[in-house]
Image (spheres, rainbow, N blue to C red):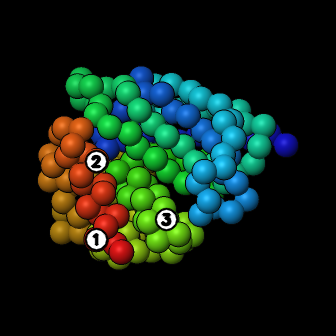
Amino acid sequence: MTETVSGLAADDPIEGALVTVYKPSDDEEESGTETLIGSAVTDTAGRYSLIAASTAPYRISVSGGTTNGQPFPGTLTAYCTTADHCNATPYTSAVYGVMQRLGSDHSEASYLVAQLLGVDYDPFTLELETGTSVPADKFDLAAARSAMTTTDSTAGWISGLATAAL
């Protein structure tokens, strides 16, 4: 069976990024056994789409490209339980980091990161997908983006969030 895997690569939209899609092993916590499904490049809005000869779940990795005219530093990762809205953001990367560090499933890791941030959605895609702004009293998206202006800061923010969720 085939399906279309699609989503968004964003802290702000990441244009021209390489999105690599993998099929994880049947055990979602076991990250070492994956099959490459395919790859795509994001458009100007940070969106990508590809036909996969496999059904969800997927793990995606996003690297390269530009955001706000500047090279995007670092790599974003996501574990996707569905083919649509398979987004990669600092939020999804933190969820995946918690999965790896705790050996937890996607649901538990998502809950832990959401509790830590005080939100029940991905603040990096809310406005891009729905047109609804992130309430500043819930999550300071501008401050988070400002903190991630270098490779070390992006990786550090994601790692720090994943560690705090433990």
SS at badge 2: helix
Q: In which quarter of the image is the C terminus?
A: bottom left
Please give the residue where the numbered disc 3 appears in the rendered image: 99
SS at badge 3: helix
Q: Quadrant of the N terminus?
A: top right
What residue is drawn where x is 54% and y is 43%? 60
Query: What is the distance, in whole Å, between disc 2 and disc 3 at their CAs?
Result: 16 Å
**Where 82 sits versus 121, above or below?**
above
- Horizontal side of 40 relative to 146 (left or right) equals right
SS at badge 1: helix
Q: How many marks?
A: 3
What residue is drawn where x is 75% and y is 48%? 55
What residue is drawn where x is 24% and y is 52%? 156
Q: 135 or 38, which lies in front?
A: 38
Tag on residue 164? 1
Estimate the x, y position of residue 65 in percent, counting from the top left: 36, 25
Residue contact between numbered discs 2 and 1, judged by CB atoms under 8 Å: no
- Horizontal side of 40 relative to 56 (left or right) equals left
Picture quadrant where residue 15 is located: top left
Disc 2 or 3, which lies upstream in sequence?
A: 3
Q: Can residue 125 be seen in this view?
A: no
Three-letter amino acid code at disc 1? Ala
Picture quadrant where residue 79 is located: bottom right
Q: Can residue 157 be seen in this view?
A: yes
Estimate the x, y position of residue 2 in percent, counting from the top left: 80, 39
Three-letter amino acid code at disc 2? Ala
Estimate the x, y position of residue 3 in percent, counting from the top left: 74, 41
Q: Residues within 10 Å of mark 2 (few under 14, many from 20)?
A: some
Please give the residue where the numbered disc 2 appears in the rendered image: 155
Disc 2 or 1, which lies upstream in sequence?
A: 2
Q: How crowded is mark 3: few (under 14 residues within 10 Å), some or many (20 or more)?
A: many
Query: What is the distance, in whole Å, between disc 1 and disc 3 at their CAs?
Result: 13 Å
